[in-house]
Image: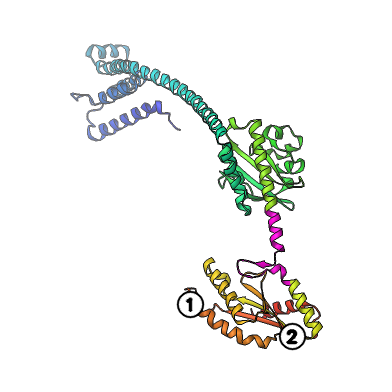
Amino acid sequence: MKIKKKHYYILEIVIAFAVYDLINFIFFKGDPGFTTAHLHPYWVVVLLISCRYGFIPGLAAGMTAALQLLFLVLPELPSRAGIEALIESGAFFLPGAFVITGVGLGLLRQRYIDSEEEKKSALLVLKDEMSKFKEMMDASERARRMLEARIVGETSTVKTIYQAARKLESLQADKIYNGCLEILEEHFQVGKSSLYLKEGEYLVLKASRGLTKSEMVEAKITARKSIMGIVMENGQTLTVKDILRLKESQKYLDEYGRVLCMFPIKNEQNAVEGVVNIEKIDFLMLNKSNLELMELIVDWTGRALYNKNLCDLAAQKIFWDQEYDIFNYAFLFTALESEFRRAQKFGTPFTMTLVKLERFGFLNKAAKDIFYRGAISLLKRYFSDTTEIFSYKFEGMLVLLCPMQKPEDLKGPFDELQRDLKEILAKAGAADEKMNISYFSVEAKQGIATSLEMLDLCQRAMRQNG
């Protein structure tokens, strides 16, 4: 049984007298109750308990000492006449002194204990009032900062808009996602937020701010199984009040309280492509005017994503890779078909070669760039101007279209290329014994009906030797 802190004196009294009895019966067996002692040891317990704990513990300690002494001194329960004789002989003086002293000192100590308790109660009341006052001061300070920010912001609106626009002008998707959430965090005091985009039937987490791993929900969830599905369906901004009013939101009870408002991300055709969730925001910022501004930021994000996708589509149509000065993979099939038809029509030789940079996937980014650029540079040096070099869909691979050449014509250039490439890699500190170039060539001979068969034969040869 667990003893409360205010009742510790009971345990102390029990232990003290148990120790006294043990000492008494081991070392002073002939003097039960220490009656011959000049200063009775029971006084230690009575004085300490009453001075420390107050009236009730003092009374308990005195009574225990008196009863303990009487029990040890009196062999049996005395009669009335025996009690009178004991009183006349002064046998009850010491037990009575224990009780009177314990009560007296306990009463004196109790006055100070009661006064201390009153002061503690008063202190707790003052702490509670100070806590409430601090909350009011904090709310006033937040309101002052927001009002000050609004006043200062009015004089720097153009600069603020420009800085916000810089976060969304990127053509990299990750920067646009994070830029949107950063604007909400910096200008609307959003503490926690997340951005999801629709991919098929799923909503995929693209960016988040302020969320810990334990707070973050699944990075990929089915749209119809999430409360965000409501926004995807109706395409309107929803606050926590709107969510609670909607009947269809009742099936998402476990997600209540997780989001305070949700904004749809729309494309140019006004179709919803994603959702921005606000999961923590200062309550003073959650008003109609700020909601409209945040909705504008999210709409701005949707337009930035549309422009990024538009640029990606345009880039796919460009057949020339300006960084490496070779043809893009997207133009390979058009050029391959054209050269194949020309060779078939005029009966001229035409060879297609698949080039593989060995160990490319095991290199770091800098070494990959050196290896890739070095290989392209050497291919241009040792092959004729009519040879067309293309990037391939797999990393570390290139395609050569060699009109007017047969596979055996390529062996000499490739041997010289291998030798020079090893020297370049050695000087760059990126050399590896297994780093070399392997190639697989196919000629447009009779029996090959289409250009795609040539590519298929190259890939088969690569797999067989890979």
- Asked which secondary structure carries label 1, the reply is helix
Viewport quadrant of the N terminus: top left
Amino acid type at image mark 1: Ala
Nearer the viewer's eye, disc 2 or disc 1? 2
Q: In this view, does 267 lie to the left or right of 107?
A: right
Q: Quadrant of residue 78?
A: top left
Evaluate whether residue 282 shows in this view: yes
Residue carrying label 1: 426
The boundaries of the magenta stretch are 308-332
- Dot 1 alpha-carbon crowd within 10 angstroms: few under 14, some 14 to 19, many 20 or more: few
Viewport quadrant of the C terminus: bottom right
Choose the circle earlier in sequence order: 2 or 1.
2
Q: Which of 264 and 221 is in front in this view?
A: 264
Q: Is 416 placed above or below 132 here?
A: below
Work out how far the residue at label 2 is from the one at label 1, CA to CA, in angstroms.
Answer: 36 Å
- Asked which secondary structure carries label 2, the reply is loop
Residue carrying label 2: 349
Q: Does the magenta stretch include residue 319?
A: yes
Q: Which of 7 and 440 is in front in this view?
A: 440
Amino acid type at image mark 2: Pro
